[in-house]
Amino acid sequence: MAEEKDKKNLLKISGYSSTAIEYILRKVNVGKIEDPDAHAVYTGPCGDSMEIFLKIEPESKEIKEAKFLAVGCAGALACGSALTVMVKGKTIEQAEKIDEDDVMNWLGGIPIQKIYCACLAKRTLKYAIKEYRNKQN
């Protein structure tokens, strides 16, 4: 318990909001979806990598489930969690409109130098949706 409190304090001092800290420590939506309808892996310029898995309802094109894996910093974990929470229940068209600022605002604060993590999450989602559309054609 003391170790989790120490991690929370360190993340708070680093500039992470309470929402971002909870996502990081609880590992919200971290994992794989077996047999996903959409999937992509992307490595950003910083070297962090993210993998996104989506389950999409065929008729409505609504995202029913979203999970991710990331190799990177706490910012990548926070942004991956935020994005997967944000897209659930949205159509793929609505999800595509989510941008980096939306992710940053949803989190309520992460260190400014971690904006590339929001870009990483957004780009990985973009590639997953592109892969989904390519499979549909």
Image: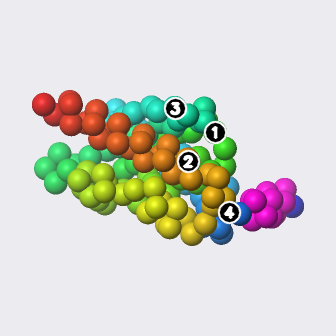
Mark nearer the N terminus (3 vs 2): 3
Numbered label attached to residue 117: 2
Return the residue nearer the eye: 9 or 46.
46
Residue that numbered label 1 is attached to? 72
Looking at numbered disc 1 in the image, what kind of residue is underneath it?
Gly
Residue 35 location, x and y as percent? 34, 32
**Is 11 included in the stretch rendered in magenta?**
yes
Q: Which residues are magenta?
A: 3-14
Cα separation between marks 3 and 2 = 11 Å
Residue 3 location, x and y as percent? 84, 56
Numbered label attached to residue 43: 3
In the rendered image, is residue 26 in sight? Answer: no
Please tell me whether mark 2 sits on a helix, a strand or a loop. helix
Cα separation between marks 1 and 4 = 16 Å
Cα separation between marks 1 and 2 = 9 Å
Mark nearer the N terminus (1 vs 3): 3
Please tell me whether mark 3 sits on a helix, a strand or a loop. strand
Residue drawn at (64%, 39%), measured in percent from left and top? 72
Q: Quadrant of the N terminus?
A: bottom right
Residue that numbered label 4 is attached to? 16
Q: Are marks 3 and 2 in contact (CB under 8 Å)?
A: no
Residue 26 location, x and y as percent? 63, 56
